[in-house]
Amino acid sequence: MSYLGWPAGIVVLVLSWIISLYTLWQLVQMHEMDGRRFNRYHELGQYAFGPKLGKWIIMPPQLIVMIGLGITYSVTGGSSLHNFYTIVCHKNGMGECHSAGLSVWIIVFSAIHLVIIQAPNFNSLSGVSLAAAFMSLSYSTIAFAGSINVGKQPGAVYNLNGYSKSQGIFGVFNALGTVAFAYGGHNVILEIQATLPSKPNQNTSVPMMRGVYIAYAVVSWCYFGVSIAGYWAFGSNVMSNVIFSIGHPKWMVAMADLFVTVHVIGSYEVYTMPVLDMIECSLVKHRIPNGLPTRLVYRSLYVCFTGFLACTIPFFGDLMGFIGALGTGPTTFWLPSVIWLVLKKPGKGSWHFWACWVCIFLGVLVTIVGSIGGLRGIIADASTYKIYQ
């Protein structure tokens, strides 16, 4: 919102919500076709484009999303832990607080995952996922209420007059990628749907879509409420994490930081599971034993890998824009429609035909310009950042 402004910001929020819901519906409907169940995104892609081409079309952006989310969530979790410690330390009158740098807190966050990541599958993460969803809703409520409570700030402006022309253009590009980042669930939806049992008289798409509609109702509150209230209160000066802009009361900010930490712990695990599944399939293919020692090694190495990259490029806002555009842009906004056109072959007189092409056009546009804006932001941040502080 800070770069898009009121009219364009509202339009982008609503349009992205509608398009992502439509493309998610497409994936859910294509989970069961021709007597088969496609339990992974790349399996559906291979069915549409062929065994080799399908894998290369789907897996690169999907891996960008899932690994990128692991990195971004590590940055978010580390930042929230860092902020929570700083608040609690000063609140309890401990004198001058010598908190470790952000990199250390990212490592602490990653250490938590060294244990949780040993969970065998999606079913075993149901409790973690439920806690993550509840914490997301709680954080969003706090962020919304906190923004309303502090009210419109005297310095709040709703334009880009404080930015150069190039900063404004690239900021808009990055904002489009950031909006796309919010809708990464398409990358795991087929794996989640695969946990539903098949019934002779009912397609799994029916109960799945019930859950999707509930989830999107929650998403609309979490993203719309926080974005609009935060922008109203702070204008273009609002931070990537609106809680940091609110700043007080301290107990509320500390609570919100804890909620964010729990949320990203659960989200990290959900988006990591498909990556681990790919690794396990590769091990089986190469006849490498996949016992407990092997799982401990590669799962722990994966956590260390995402934690290392998070320490190296801890730029939350620009990471969201870059990953959202380059990874979520294809897998959420236009690849489902391409697959739908290939497999369902709707006629030109069908509204699905034209809806698919609108999704493809807008999705490709977001992928290109959002990637440019996010990459430019990361480079600009890196030029003034002291690494591993």
Image (tube, rainbow, N blue to C red):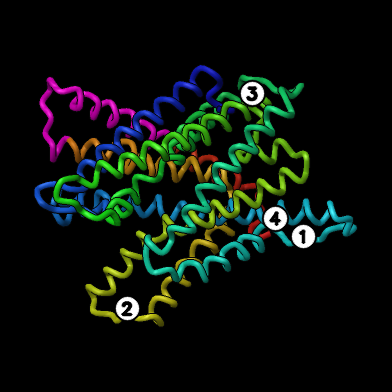
Q: Amino acid at mark 3?
A: Trp
Q: Residue furthest front?
A: 201
Which residue was labeled with disc 3?
Answer: 232
Distance (Cα) linking label 4 and label 3? 27 Å
Residue 176 drawn above or below residue 130: above
Magenta stretch, overall SS: helix
Q: Which residues are magenta?
A: 341-369
Distance (Cα) linking label 1 and label 2? 40 Å
Do callouts 4 and 3 mark residues in contact (Cβ within 8 Å)?
Answer: no
Which residue was labeled with disc 4?
Answer: 82
Q: Give me the disc on residue 162.
A: none
Instruction: Mark 3 or mark 2: name the one nearer the start of the chain.
Output: 3
Q: Amino acid at mark 2?
A: Asn
Q: Position of residue 215 (x, y in %)?
A: 42, 40
Which residue was labeled with disc 2?
Answer: 290
Instruction: Mark 3 or mark 1: name the one nearer the start of the chain.
Output: 1
Residue drawn at (52%, 71%) of the image: 115
Instruction: Tell me if mark 4 has few (under 14), some (14-19) or many (20+) residues whose alpha carbon lies within 10 angstroms of its own.
Output: many
Q: Is residue 36 magenta?
A: no
Do callouts 1 and 4 mark residues in contact (Cβ within 8 Å)?
Answer: yes
Distance (Cα) linking label 1 and label 4? 8 Å
